[in-house]
Structures are given as C-alpha cells and as structure tokens.
Amino acid sequence: MPVAFVTSAIAGVMGLGGGMLLIAAMPGLLPAQAIIPVHAFTQLASNASRAAFGWRDIAWSIVPAFALGAIAGAWGGGEIYGQIDLFWLPAIIGVLILLITWVPLPQVPGGGQLALAVLGFYQTGLGMLAGATGPLGASLLLRRNQERDWVVVNTALYMSLNHAIRLAAFAMLGFSFGPWWPLMLAMAAAVIAGSWVGTRMRGLIPQRNFAPLFKTLVSVLALRMIAMPFFS
C-alpha cells in the first residue's frame, strides 16, 4: 500500500508517471495474469480522484472523441492480450515502459476531435499490454492549454476513461476480479490519499526536479521486469 500511495502522490504533482512506477513494482508480488487488471482498477481510483480534486479545470469536451477511440483500442488490444504467453508479460511490459520513457513519443497530428480519437485508440490498445501509458497524451493536451493544473486534471480525466474501458474489456476476456477485491480496495484507498496529498503539493514543488530521478527509477524497475522471466 505505501508504494501505491507514493506513486499516486507523484502523479498528483507531475500529472503522470505514477502508473508506470506502480506497475513496474508489481511483478513478483502478483501473478502475471492479475497485474494489468488490478493495476487498471487502482489507476482508475487514482486518476478519478485526481480529476475530482481539480474538477474546476475539467474540459468535458475531450470525452466523446477519446472514449470512442478508446473503445476501439480496447477491442484491438484485447485481441492481442488474449494471444500472448503471460509468462513473458512482465518482460513485455518492461520493454514498453523503456520505450515510453526514452523514445520520442509519436505525435498525434492536429489537436481537434480526430486527434483525441486517435489518441484514445492507440493509448488504450497499448494499455491493454503495458498497463501504464499516461505520458502518451501529454503533448496533445499541451497543445490545447499550457497551464499545469489544467494538463494534470485533464490527463487524469482521459486516463480515467482509459482504465474504465480496459476494466470492462478484461471482464469480457474472462478475468475474475472477485479474489482481488480486498487488495484492489486497499490499493484504491491508498492512491486516493496519494492523489489528495499530491494535489496539494503540486504548487510547491518545481516539476523539472522530478524528471531525471523519475526516468532513472522507472528504467531500473523496467529492467527488473525484463529480467524476471529468465530467473523465475
């Protein structure tokens, strides 16, 4: 639970990154088949609470197009998820996290509704495999508004949609959430508390101070994930 709290607080300050840190710490603590569904539930609680704490900055106009693309992405990503060998899932997640962290992200052309639909499609589709994809939409939102509170809150809004749609997709794929409810509810409480703390810390901490440390830490955790199947 402390890890969930800290990663959510980090996301509350930075607007992203908490989900990647959390999922990078989960392999070895949960069975491979439970990692992404449990992570999706936890991050839904984290992002929804962060959006609620900053509700004055919510831009509801981004919801319809993003949701439409996300539904299509969840279907496509779910088809791939159903075919992969879960033994290799931690390594796959680790590789994707390294790519998201260090490789320049694809730029979605434009900034209108079509761009939001494309973002929803590839972000949710990739999220079915990697779990944490929040940084993918940051550049698109920054084209609309440079104000940090607006970007943080609306990143939380579209990521809430992302996680909710993926949870529905995992349920349709046959994942049983029943055995995991006590853990998921405890983690949800921890990330909501983290969101509250991070929201209040956001104006006190310069965001630039986090970037080098965050990239180093998440890369070490991703390398651990890549190595796990070879030492299990």
Image: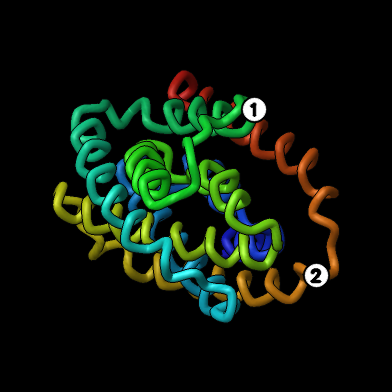
Q: Which sits in the foreground, 83 or 133?
A: 133
Q: Is residue 30 left or right of residue 77?
A: right
Q: Quadrant of the C terminus?
A: top left
User: On screen, 27 above or below 156?
Assistant: above
Q: What element does badge 1 sit on?
A: helix
Q: Is residue 208 left or right of residue 165?
A: right
In the picture, the disc for residue 203 is: 2
Q: Residues within 10 Å of mark 2 (few under 14, many from 20)?
A: few
Image coordinates for residue 111, horizontal then vertical, percent: 49, 47
Q: Is residue 98 left or right of residue 205?
A: left
Q: Amino acid at mark 1?
A: Trp
Image coordinates for residue 173, horizontal then vertical, percent: 16, 47
Q: Amino acid at mark 2?
A: Gly
Image quadrant in which you'd find residue 13 = bottom right
Question: Residue at horizontal 68%, vertical 73%?
Answer: 199
Q: What element does badge 2 sit on?
A: loop
Q: Is residue 225 visible?
A: no
Q: How is the image coloured?
A: rainbow
Question: Residue at horizontal 33%, vertical 52%?
Answer: 37
- Whether pointer 1 and pointer 2 mark residues with C-beta atoms closer than 8 Å, the reply is no
In the picture, the disc for residue 102 is: 1
